[in-house]
Amino acid sequence: MKHRKPNLLLLALFLLFTYPLFSQDGMKFQEQYQVKIGKSKSPIKIDGILDESGWADAEEAKDFHMKWPNDIGRPTRNTFVKITHDDHFIYFGIKAIDTNYYIAQTLKRDQGIYESDAISIAIDPVNQRTNGFLFSITPYNVQTEELVNVGAPSEELSFSWDNKWFSATSRHPTYWIAEIAIPFHTLRFNEGHDKWGLNILRSDLKTNEYSCWTDMPLNFDFYDFGYSGSILWDKAPVSPGTNASIIPYITSSASSNKELANPTTAKFNAGFDAKLSLTPSLNLDLTVNPDFSQVEVDRQVTNLTRFDIFFPERRTFFLENSDLFSSYGIPPIRPFYSRTIGLDKNANPIPILAGARVSGNLTKKTRVGFMNMQTKLTDDFDAQNYTAVSFNQQVQARSSVKGYFLNRQSIADKNSTLKDPGDNFGRNAGLEYKFIDKAGKWNAWTGFHRSFKPNINTPEYYGNVGGGYASKHLNVIVDAGKITDKYYADMGFVNRVDNYDALLDTVYRRGFFLIYNQSSYTFFPKKGPFNQLMVSLENDAILNLDGSQNERNHDLELRFFLKNTSNLVLHFHKNVNNLLYNTSFTDGKPIPPGKYSANVYGLTYNTDSRKKFFFETNIEAGQFFNGNIFRYELSANFRIQPWANFTMSLQQANLSFPGVYGKNNLFLIAPRIEINFSNNLFWTTFLQYNNQRNNFNINSRLQWRYKPMSDLFLVYSDNYFTDPFMKNKSRAIVFKLNYWLNL
């Protein structure tokens, strides 16, 4: 029987031309929800009191609407937000009706917007209903800020964008006050805009309620500017002009690596980052001899797949406006993955000499990104130059066309270690279109990506097409893609193409078709202990390029969200795998190629996260290829709010195969201690014992924010083998000091 290949072109035409293009216009929100802003008649002092006469004349946003767990009715407690300005700042004066007790997970900044009692403000100065800024404050004056960019899904919010703004809070028996001053030069806007987009979210965890100024549909994030209200200026604010800052740093360290027989050595280093606004909405970032020693180590996981794990980027230089480069493709296939720059495949650092990046809005509807990074020649790696260019053009109301070009170029000299001439460069280019209707419910996307390598003359590409629908109750996503054998992404992350044969110790490259769909339906009970009930079905099918089956997965989940914030998930997973290569999970004989079918049943339960002690657990049991699996994950958390968090995370997976195929017991334990002595002094210690990686890691970091955006770090790291246990691999202690200087 001849297999028929999926026709991606026909699927693309079907999705794009059968989409309903009519929708509710979200602009009505800016007519319904408005607040006028005038210049304050008196100076505003940021002290958390709101006693200046300028606040008395300021209009306020009030009468909030329920946002979660349902978008019906009004919240239990009221929120009032006044807005005014002077020549340099926009001010927000917040009064939140409350008790004298608050849920406060931490005193550390940039820790999210949903985990603590907080007020979050989303501002769109150019009012294009796509991009903007997010600022959040808790009753304990913990700040969080982030850029909001079209195409960056909420789970990718990194809170990596840092800039100076000012706030103060005060707590009272029946309410709390927050006073905020945001400099105009922080907001990066052009002159002439007398209407800005605005929305406000109140997180009230004690009632398990999130309320929003505008009456937004439940299925959209509050910072979706398609449903924002508006600030009406008495006079359009003047452009803030050029904003420049430089952040120099110095480090000193002592380190040893016994695994490589390297003795203890001491080093001194220095470098700097710089930020310059080329225009009010276009920013230049520079880095010279960057150092990322203060960045927290990756949280390890037990890997039960045959492929690499995707770890998030943590280095701040790569995170601002990162969606301009990293949002291409779909999660298993990303043409750009910034961790390839300055890190090898084992996450070992490679020195970066310097880098530059331009990113932001070129016009109201055009965003651009340019990045160039140069790494240093080492004993094991040639010097590399990395270039990335990207554009994002808004079309129609909220849709976009975007494209990129990537280039990795080896720079060889007489000391070059380059042995394969076919690896001296890798280039990628791609173009994507994403349609979003005005209401944000319907969306569709398609993209085509090419790779270029020496001695590969045939067209090697990756392409996909998909669409989705999101409403309060129903959420549907479909996607189909194809990737060829020799599609390379030297600056990206591509899963499944490399297949390792454990018996022959050989890697084979295989392209594939991917067909994916996910559907979920949410119920909102009016009575009983549940806020929401959700049923979800997820399917994916991997086909070989000749159309034959490679692998397919089916996941069925039932989710129960309780009113006390705890939740329960029952899940069933079915895997049908036409294994093509010998695969090993134990020290025994590798599992031979063949067809395997496995069913796994699981349960996940999370207790009330508002409590000082809460835990999360996940248990799974069933079949695994020709054997069986039993695995569990347990995370216990104890909080002495707001100054301390203690977490113990434990993962264990028992794999049992018949006869000569062996057994394996994978074990990962990771305690974490976080002490917040104040809003400016933090100590975090993270331990990880992972017998799969034969590594026990200690990472302890003391951070003192001695001035706004200026830090002193003291970092200790230690690595040991787990077998033989506690034999030292490497050790280091690092001191780092940086200072944020506005020019």
Image: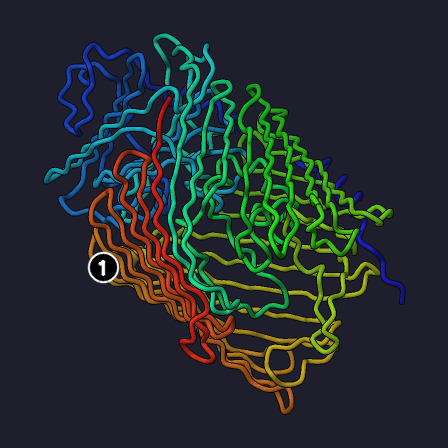
Please indicate whether residue 6 sits to the left or right of residue 75 in the image: right
Secondary element at image label 1: loop
- At 54% from the left and 33% from the top, the residue drawn is 150
Which residue is the site of mark 1? 612
Q: Position of residue 315 (x, y in %)?
A: 47, 45
Of 662 and 565, which appears nearest the observer? 662
Of 300 and 171, which appears nearest the observer? 300
Please indicate whether residue 382 sits to the left or right of residue 697 in the image: right
- At 66% from the left and 50% from the top, the residue drawn is 382
**Quadrant of residue 141 in the image?**
top left
Q: Where is residue 166 in the image (x, y as percent from the top left)?
A: 27, 29
Q: In which quarter of the image is the C terminus?
A: top left
Q: Where is residue 481 in the image (x, y as percent from the top left)?
A: 72, 50
- At 63% from the left and 91% from the top, the residue drawn is 659
In the image as oriented, which residue stretches furthest toward the left? 173
Task: Classify 261 as above or below 24.
Answer: below
Q: How is the image coloured?
A: rainbow
Q: Note whether residue 234 is visible.
A: yes
Please indicate whether residue 351 sits to the left or right of residue 294 in the image: right
Q: How many marks?
A: 1
Q: Quadrant of the N terminus?
A: bottom right
Q: Where is residue 433 in the image (x, y as percent from the top left)?
A: 67, 35
In the image as oriented, which residue stretches furthest toward the top? 235
Check disc 1: other Cα within 10 Å, few if <14, some if 14-19, many if 20+: some
Q: Which amino acid does label 1 sit on?
A: Lys
Task: Classify 127 as above or below 285.
Answer: above
Q: Note whether residue 73 is visible.
A: no
- At 63% from the left and 64% from the top, the residue drawn is 307
